[in-house]
């Protein structure tokens, strides 16, 4: 399976996730407990990975599985980073509005590139760095509202704490992705065994969140296991399956590709979501959206295209003396 096929599929699934989530609402509200969605998605990913691991163990040659506690103990760390990241997100939104938060979220594109270089030691060419910055500019451009709107000035009017938390959120998001890639490529263990470890801890952390919500709410709506499926519809189940499938594709990319491919997939998904919203939710197209799409497509070409497609390499002319030498060498080979 080629990485670009998986990346394209990830783009489609990621773009449809926001649309499905919106369609799962009733009169702008959720009839179900949204905290149960990531929990069930983790259970789905764990079940699929366990089944695929079991199928692989049925073969004559057993897959490589490291069971040392020092290695297994590394797998809860991404869940802890995401837990901190989620809390930082809520804290950021107390200082900035939603549009400013979305624009600041594009910083994770650049921070991913920086951490990609620092922690994984991957060297990026100058053109690739320019492409990453262009991607951040393109996604930001597509999200900026018209200057005639009231929220236009609010982008630069938030308190300094909001910007600091926004930068921290971008760094945590990039760190979680970089660390997950490090885990996936740390050894030659089968992907399914790595997924089982990763999603086991993900399930545990999401379960702990449900239990904590019960205690905070004083069990007003009953324990989580009694209300877990309350309000669920076919669309809600599609949200769960979409979220779980997206996670499985991301883990595959972390194993066989890298974080930059994932960043491009999710960024293109955001633009695809905006385009689909034009037809589904009467979303009005803006000049900023079209400019953002053009910039992101240029960035995509700059990053992944071979250098000889991006630069006009001058054709070196052959000097007359060199031509005579070539003719002489050919004549000698023919006479010998």
Image (cartoon, rainbow, N blue to C red):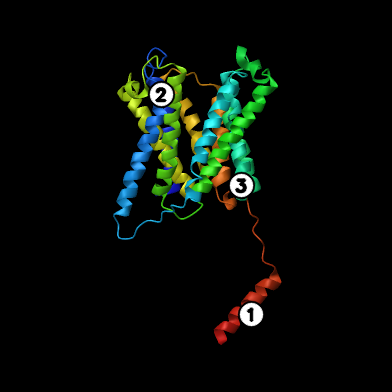
Q: Quadrant of residue 315?
A: bottom right
Label 3 vs 2, first from the N-terminus: 2
Q: Quadrant of residue 202?
A: top left
> Residue drawn at (31%, 49%), measured in percent from left and top?
54
Tell me the SS state at disc 1.
helix
Spot occupied by residue 23 in the image (x, y as percentages of width and height):
38, 20
What secondary structure is found at the residue carrying circle 3? helix
Count of numbered tags: 3
Left or right: 175 with respect to 161? left
Residue 78 horizontal/vertical position (percent): 51, 39
What residue sits right under mark 3 in the picture?
Answer: 119
Q: Is residue 53 above or below residue 295?
A: below
Quarter of the rendering containing residue 147: top right
Question: CA–CA distance between discs 3 and 2?
Answer: 34 Å
The x, y position of residue 276, in whole percent, is 43, 26
- Viewer-nearest of discs 2 and 1: 2
Residue tagged 2: 21
């Amino acid at each position: 399976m080629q990485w670009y096929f998986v990346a394209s599929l990830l783009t489609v699934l990621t773009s449809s996730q926001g649309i499905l989530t919106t369609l799962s609402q009733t009169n702008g509200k959720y009839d179900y407990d949204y905290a149960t969605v990531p929990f069930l998605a983790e259970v789905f990913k764990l079940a699929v990975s366990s089944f695929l691991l079991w199928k692989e163990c049925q073969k004559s040659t057993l897959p490589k599985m490291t069971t040392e506690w020092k290695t297994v103990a590394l797998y809860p760390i991404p869940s802890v980073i995401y837990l901190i990241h989620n809390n930082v997100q809520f804290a950021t939104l107390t200082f900035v509005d939603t549009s400013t938060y979305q624009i600041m979220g594009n910083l994770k594109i650049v921070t991913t590139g920086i951490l990609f270089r620092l922690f994984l030691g991957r060297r990026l060419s100058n053109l690739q760095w320019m492409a990453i910055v262009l991607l951040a500019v393109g996604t930001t451009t597509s999200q900026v509202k018209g200057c005639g709107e009231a929220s236009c000035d609010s982008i630069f009017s938030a308190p300094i704490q909001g910007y600091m938390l926004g930068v921290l959120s971008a760094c945590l998001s990039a760190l979680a992705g970089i660390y997950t890639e490090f885990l996936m490529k740390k050894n030659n263990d089968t992907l399914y065994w790595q997924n089982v470890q990763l999603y086991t801890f993900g399930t545990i952390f999401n379960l702990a969140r449900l239990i904590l919500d019960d205690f905070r709410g004083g069990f007003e709506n009953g324990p989580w296991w009694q209300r877990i499926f309350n309000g669920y519809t076919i669309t809600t189940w599609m949200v769960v399956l979409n979220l779980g499938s997206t996670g499985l594709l991301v883990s595959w990319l972390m194993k066989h590709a890298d974080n930059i491919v994932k960043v491009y997939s999710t960024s293109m998904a955001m633009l695809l979501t905006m385009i689909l919203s034009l037809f589904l939710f009467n979303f009005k197209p803006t000049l900023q959206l079209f400019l953002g799409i053009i910039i992101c497509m240029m960035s995509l070409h700059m990053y992944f295209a071979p250098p000889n497609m991006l630069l006009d390499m001058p054709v070196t002319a052959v000097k007359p003396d060199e031509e005579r030498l070539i003719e002489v060498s050919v004549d000698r080979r023919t006479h010998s």
